[in-house]
Amino acid sequence: MNPTIRTAAIGTERLELLPLLVDHAGEMAATLADPALHTFIGGAPDTPQDLRARYERMVAGAPDPAVSWCNWVIRLREETSLAGTVQATIGPSGDGLTAEIAWVVGTPWQGRGIATEAALGLVGWLERQPVDTLVAHVHPDHRASAAVAAACGLAPTGQWHDGEIRWQRNLR
Ligand SMILES: CC(C)(COP(=O)(O)OP(=O)(O)OC[C@H]1O[C@@H](n2cnc3c(N)ncnc32)[C@H](O)[C@@H]1OP(=O)(O)O)[C@@H](O)C(=O)NCCC(=O)NCCS
């Protein structure tokens, strides 16, 4: 059995990545309120109540003890506001552990390199965990997300998953 990987705070130059708490839901519902955030990932913004229920499930952790759900909110050091989230779902695949990573930045904060800086902070942290492979699924038309994945050293594979391309980086 793989050990559960515990989320810890991660600092970057402009950002603090804070382990997600249920109490972040109220503010995050406003940060993530723009339906445009769902253009490439499907779904629709959650109400504060629904987001709180979602965060309760996320904080409770994966039902499979071999899988770790690691979630962070992104806080800008120079603002009190929360700008988005990054996440890593870490579990066994093949011989080792794979982390599937994803990022969301609220529309008012986009275009400032926040997703790239947050994802690089996340990847730096994952490099210090017993993780062998990084994976992200990116819609083929989503240039901003592809740029974030490329900045993190991931490269597109030929594999498709639910209309998205699997990007991958081997850490070991
Ligand atoms: C993908 C997302 C997180 C990017 O957030 P961001 O903070 O604006 O990203 P950055 O500012 O770090 O920019 C990343 C790259 O995308 C580029 N970019 C930003 N907005 C863009 C746009 N609208 N069109 C094309 N490229 C764009 C930037 O120029 C940058 O590329 P570069 O490093 O080559 O200059 C944000 O658009 C988002 O949350 N989208 C909705 C959720 C989503 O689809 N998440 C992806 C799931 S894997």
Image (cartoon, rainbow, N blue to C red):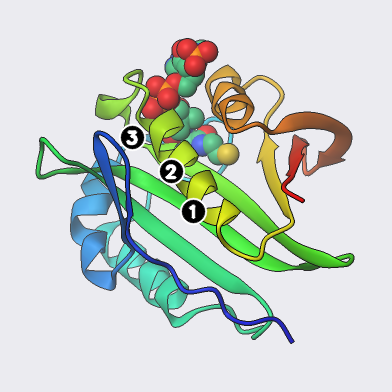
- Tell me, for residue 110, which label it has, or none: none
Q: Is the residue marked 3 within 8 Å of ligand 1, measured from its CB?
A: no
Residue name at image x 20 percent, y 59 percent = 26
For this rendering, which residue is in front, 84 or 141? 84
Is residue 92 among what the camera can see? yes
Give the residue pinned by disc 1. Answer: 125
User: Please, what secondary structure does the residue beneath circle 3 have?
Assistant: loop
Amino acid at circle 2: Gly
- In the image, residue 145 sits, relative to residue 163, either above or below, namely above
Amino acid type of disc 1? Trp
Q: Position of residue 77 (x, y in %)?
A: 16, 40
Residue 25 in percent (x, y) is at 26, 61
Mark before the other along the chain sequence, 1 or 3: 3
Q: Secondary structure at mark 2?
A: helix
The residue depicted at 54 percent of the width and 74 percent of the height is 5
> Mark 3 = which residue?
34
Eye-nearest disc, 3 or 2: 2
Judge from the rendering whether residue 96 lies leftward or rightward of residue 40; answer left or right: right
